[in-house]
Image: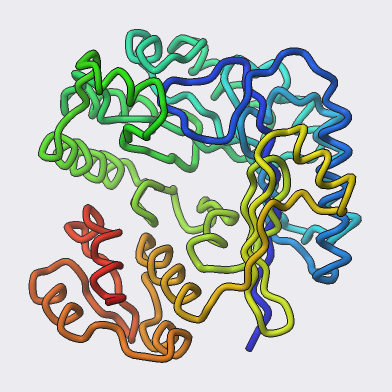
Amino acid sequence: MSTPALGIYVHWPYCATICPYCDFNVYRARGADNAPLLDAIIADIEAHARRFGKREAVSLFLGGGTPSLLRGVEVARLIDAADRAFGLAANCEITIEANPEDAALYAEQAAAGVNRFSVGAQAFNDAALKALGRRHDAASALRAVEAAAATGKRVSLDLIYAREGQSVADWRAELQQALALPVEHVSLYQLTIEPRTAFARRVDRGQLVPPDGEEGAALYEATQDVCDAAGFPAYEISNHARGAAARSQHNLLYWRSADWVGVGPGAHGRMTHEGARYAFEAQQRPADYIDAVRESGFGWITEAVLTREEIADETLLMGLRTDEGVDAAQVEVVRGRPLNADARAWLQEQGFITEREGRIVLTPQGRLLANRISAELAI
């Protein structure tokens, strides 16, 4: 069995403000010294390399939170630490999630080694940005994309749709505007009301009414139409790229159930070692994470060996999200029993899945029900 490809995910948990729809592990940046957390993350990376061995990484992803708050010298420390500990491939994809208001830092982040910017514009409509709790306006988002492109590095763009009151026509126009920008990749997320967020509380009080399922499906279908016409076909449910080379190499590791080191407060990781697949979750609070690294070398709060069933379920759930689907025979070997043959036949008959050279692939209709289809096949 070949060794899975390896990526490194670094979670920087601080944000200038906390968005009302966000349920990530984030904290308000209050001007504290970054050095203690940077030191802990670097020590955690080094501990992973000692535990699992040095393996060349094909991607390094700085996510959050808002890692674009970091100065170039701080970003360089993280990149250098990952390279020393594991070795970064010559063509390693080094991504930073970037807020538009940090555009003045993009050039120094690129000089530090970042070669892909994921710009969190979220919308190109001032009223929508205000409703989403964002601090930038549409003009700033446009300038940020231009600033990222000016570095000469790859540019991806994040947008949120299925916003309250958003029409299909409005979304089509906004998306067409976005796809005309100097970007090669877009991540287009339907607004999801997550528990324990400010948006969830507003929905409970009747102060926010997001689109219903039928409206959401119409917006999703419009998304596919506009992206296909602009040369940005979907290679995953929410992700579109201008050609195979523009796809997110880091996210493909997740969807292909490869390995990734997860460091930083609240980060998750998956590592295959000596015939077992390990799942890790780091301490969530930055202070607890720093203490854990100081005491044990790792920032983990949990470490578990996944069962064959859990590995197979993850492989199925994640792989079905992509246009390449999953190798059915491989999943069945891992889980030690067949997938649900009746469900498989019915889903194919109803046009939710198709099969190509032994791979189960979701149809456009099936992508709207991806999690449910995965659960049916795994029964």
The image quadrant that residue 357 belongs to is bottom left
Name above or below for residue 291 compared with residue 22.
below
Q: Residue 141, image x and y in percent?
A: 50, 17
Q: Nearer the viewer, residue 173 or 190?
A: 190
Determine if residue 149 is in view: no
Q: Position of residue 356 (x, y in %)?
A: 29, 80
Residue shown at 43% from the left, 25% from the top: 122
Q: Is residue 43 above or below residue 144?
A: below
Depth order, front residue of 232/334: 334
Quadrant position of residue 39: top right
Q: Residue at 42% across / 82% down in the picture?
A: 331
Left or right of residue 307: residue 377: left
Res 377 seen here: yes
Return the residue nearer the eye: 116 or 159: 159
> With 207 as the anchor, is 245 left or right in this view?
right
- Tell me the quarter of the image containing the C terminus: bottom left
Residue at image location 23% in from the left, 71% down from the top: 376
Quadrant assignment, res 227: top left
Residue 224 percent coordinates (x, y): 25, 45
Classify 229 as above or below 371.
above
Is residue 186 depicted above or below 53 in this figure?
Answer: above
